[in-house]
Amino acid sequence: MELTQEQIIGFNRWMAATVRGNKVLTKASDSYIGLIVLEENKLTVNLEHLSPEYQEKFILKNFDDYCKKFITFLKRTIVRFFELEQIEFHTFNFIFILDGRKFEKFVTIITPS
């Protein structure tokens, strides 16, 4: 199922609100808007928007594991957005970037019936 441009804009706002709603991410982030951005099916998480201290403490020791946990964290928020928008499912290409590192994973999010 493809998302409309209006839904993509709403989704990006929803993700920015998710960052603002998380105390740890809010403190570590220099941009609510630039950290998580959806363009078509590509959901980019630009970890360079997080402070060096946060990166050192949570990300750099196990980059892939952090990315997988972040996807799990976002799934609940995405499902809630889908419920509000009446979207049954969508496949995202999650792309995490940080200082030349890249983690990529296709994930289908399904709204429970």
Image (spheres, rainbow, N blue to C red):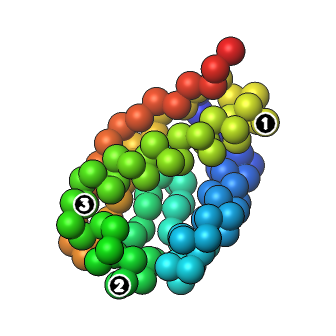
Query: Mark 2 sits on what residue?
Result: 52
* Amino acid beneath label 2: Pro
Quadrant for the N terminus, please: top right
The picture quadrant where one finds residue 86 is top right
* Amino acid beneath label 3: Phe
Point out residue 107 in the picture as x, y percentages from the top left corner: 41, 35
Identify the element where label 1 is drawn: helix
Residue 63 numbered tag: 3
Whether residues under marks 3 and 2 lie with C-beta atoms below 8 angstroms apart, the answer is no
* Amino acid beneath label 1: Leu
Residue 84 numbered tag: 1
Which label's residue is closer to the chain start, 3 or 2? 2
Residue extending farthest to the top is 113
The crowd level at tag 1 (other Cα within 10 Å; few <14, some 14-19, many 20+) is few
Identify the element where label 3 is drawn: helix
Point out residue 35 in the picture as x, y percentages from the top left corner: 51, 68
The answer to whether residue 96 shows anywhere in this view is: yes
Give the label, 2 or 1, closer to the camera: 2
The picture quadrant where one finds residue 12 is bottom right
Q: CA distance from mark 3 to mark 2?
A: 14 Å
Which label's residue is closer to the chain start, 2 or 1? 2
The front one of 92 and 70 is: 70
The picture quadrant where one finds residue 31 is bottom right
Residue at image location 34% in from the left, 53% down from the top: 67
Q: CA distance from mark 1 to mark 3?
A: 32 Å
Residue at image location 70% in from the left, 41% down from the top: 81
The crowd level at tag 3 (other Cα within 10 Å; few <14, some 14-19, many 20+) is some
Residue at image location 30% in from the left, 67% down from the top: 59
Horizontal side, residue 43 vs residue 14: left or right: left
The front one of 2 and 110 is: 110
Horizontal side, residue 87 vs residue 30: left or right: right
Residue at image location 66% in from the left, 69% down from the top: 20
